[in-house]
Image (cartoon, rainbow, N blue to C red):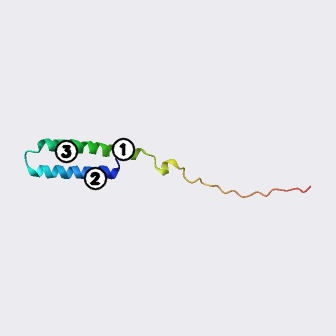
Amino acid sequence: MTLKELKDKYDRLGNQIDGLAGQGVGHEARLISLQAELDQVHRELSELRRRTWAVPTLRDVVSGPVAMVLRPVEPTLVLAG
């Protein structure tokens, strides 16, 4: 899943849990199921975050600019002949 899909699912599950919790007793099994699903989405988000931080950035891959040392040009003697 993409990050956006995981965030949307996390929000949706959180809202469903809040809605069922506000209704009182009688929904314990559904609440437990939703909480387990929310825990799974949380693990997936954590794994995605770990993978994202492990990926090298452009700065890691591309070497920086090379410092150039300017040297005076030495004249060369060209002999005609």
- The kind of secondary structure element at disc 2 is helix
- Work out whether 27 lies above or below 78: above
Q: Amino acid at mark 2?
A: Asp
Q: Which mark is residue 34?
A: 3
Circles 2 and 1 in contact, beta carbons < 8 Å = no
Q: Amino acid at mark 3?
A: Leu
Whether the residues at callouts 1 and 3 have beta carbons within 8 Å, the answer is no
Mark 1, Cα crowd under 10 Å, few <14 / some 14-19 / many 20+, is few
Task: Between residue 50 and residue 67, name the one nearer to us.
Answer: 50
**Callout 3: few (<14), some (14-19), or many (20+) C-alpha neighbours within 10 Å?**
some
Near mark 2 (Cα within 10 A), the count class, few <14, some 14-19 or many ≥20, is few
From the top left corner, tell me how far across and down residue 68 is, in percent. Answer: 63, 55
Q: Is residue 1 left or right of residue 57?
A: left
Residue located 13% across and 41% down the image: 29
Q: Is residue 69 left or right of residue 64?
A: right
* Residue placed under numbered mark 1 in the picture: 50
Which residue occupies the foreground of this view, 63 or 49?
49
Residue 72 badge? none
In the image, 47 versus 71, the foreground residue is 47
